[in-house]
Amino acid sequence: MHVDDLIRKVHETDSLTREELVLMLSCPPDSPEAYRIMAAANMISKDLTGNKAEVHAQFALNLAPCPANCAFCSFAKMHGIFTQELRITAEDAVSQAKRFEAEGANAVFVMTTAAYPFELFLDMSSEIRRNLDAKTLLIANVGDQSLKNAIRLKEAGYTGVYHALRLREGTDTTLSPEGRRQSIRNFQEAGLGVGTCIEPVGPEHTNEEIAELIQFTSSITPSYSGAARRITIPGSEIAKRGMISELRMAQVVAVTRLGVTRKVLGNCTHEPCTLGAIAGANLFWAESGANPRDTRERTEEGRGESVSSCRALFRESGWDVWEGPSRYYTGQG
């Protein structure tokens, strides 16, 4: 079957088989077929959202050597990049959240490393929630959680979470793939929207692996899906595998949009780039504080983008930007 036939099929049935996803992923990134895939994904993303993208913003409550030892993460204890834990105060957390709110972020994410104490996370979250406008959406980016803890996150004022079953989970991480899946089920059962992503894509990942994860993502009907490439952590063992190009990343973003049900409005990519936006990404993140793709303590001084720079990238790519709480987590707008 030709790529154009698959694009027509998506418009007619909103469904692709794993083999069809692999065919799309197998096109050379700079081929005419890949560009047609990107154009189709861009059209669908814009149609679903009225040509209005979103910018979400994330800050970290801590920076610490993490025992989960994800090979692609700068926090991994085995890398020795960060050797002691640093925690921000409640006052600093409130200040960062209010700044993102004032800058117009459509949702504010609160991130921690996997071992950050859950009770402390709830205490900090309560203080953050109390100081924000009631309409501002809070999203948690934390480790695997039980259903009980997921319910407590909801009660603490969170609308949703970010959680992903990563590529080669359990091989490039010490975490259980089933544990990740169960956490997603727990979050959804607790009434939390789950945003996710095909990540972190590297040159070693096969088209079959990526296609399988796209199908899993579609099966959970997340708040948004999308794709992100692995950013090289200098000196890490996984750095020897290399990094895919932004063009290949744009292709994966586009195929993900075509492979995920249209019930899902959002299609993210990270890090923010015009190629991703042209290929159908309608969600970027601004970041401050610790960042698992950065070796600096304050990513706003390194790889991290601001809300305004993310908005500018979207506008350069022909997108308008949504004003107000995220539609991806609320399903409204």
Image (cartoon, grey):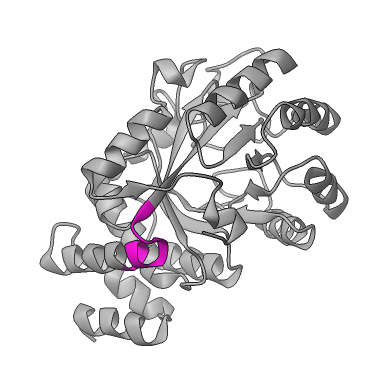
**Against 295, is 21 above or below?**
below
User: Please, what is the dominant secondary structure of the magenta stretch?
Assistant: helix
Determine the image quadrant of residue 46: bottom left
Asked whether 38 or 85 is in front, the reply is 38
Report the quarter where the N terminus lies: bottom left
Q: Picture coordinates of residue 217 (x, y %)?
A: 54, 64
Regarding residue 69, the answer to whether it shows in the image is no
Q: Picture coordinates of residue 319 (x, y %)?
A: 29, 50
> Position of 110 compared to 308: left or right?
right
> Position of 186 compared to 251: left or right?
right
Whether residue 275 appears in magenta in the rendering, the answer is no
Query: Which portion, as a residue range, is magenta?
Result: 44-52
**Against 34, is 309 above or below?**
above
> Position of 234 compared to 165: left or right?
left
Whether residue 45 appears in magenta in the rendering, the answer is yes
Asked whether 119 or 237 is in front, the reply is 119
Q: Picture coordinates of residue 274 (x, y %)?
A: 25, 43
Q: At x 20% / y 58%, what residue is drawn?
A: 29
> Position of 22 compared to 73: left or right?
left
Task: State how many labels appear.
Answer: 0
Q: At x 35% / y 39%, what residue is drawn?
A: 272
Regarding residue 333, the answer to whether it shows in the image is yes
Q: At x 40% / y 68%, what residue is drawn?
A: 208
Q: Picture coordinates of residue 191 (x, y %)?
A: 75, 58
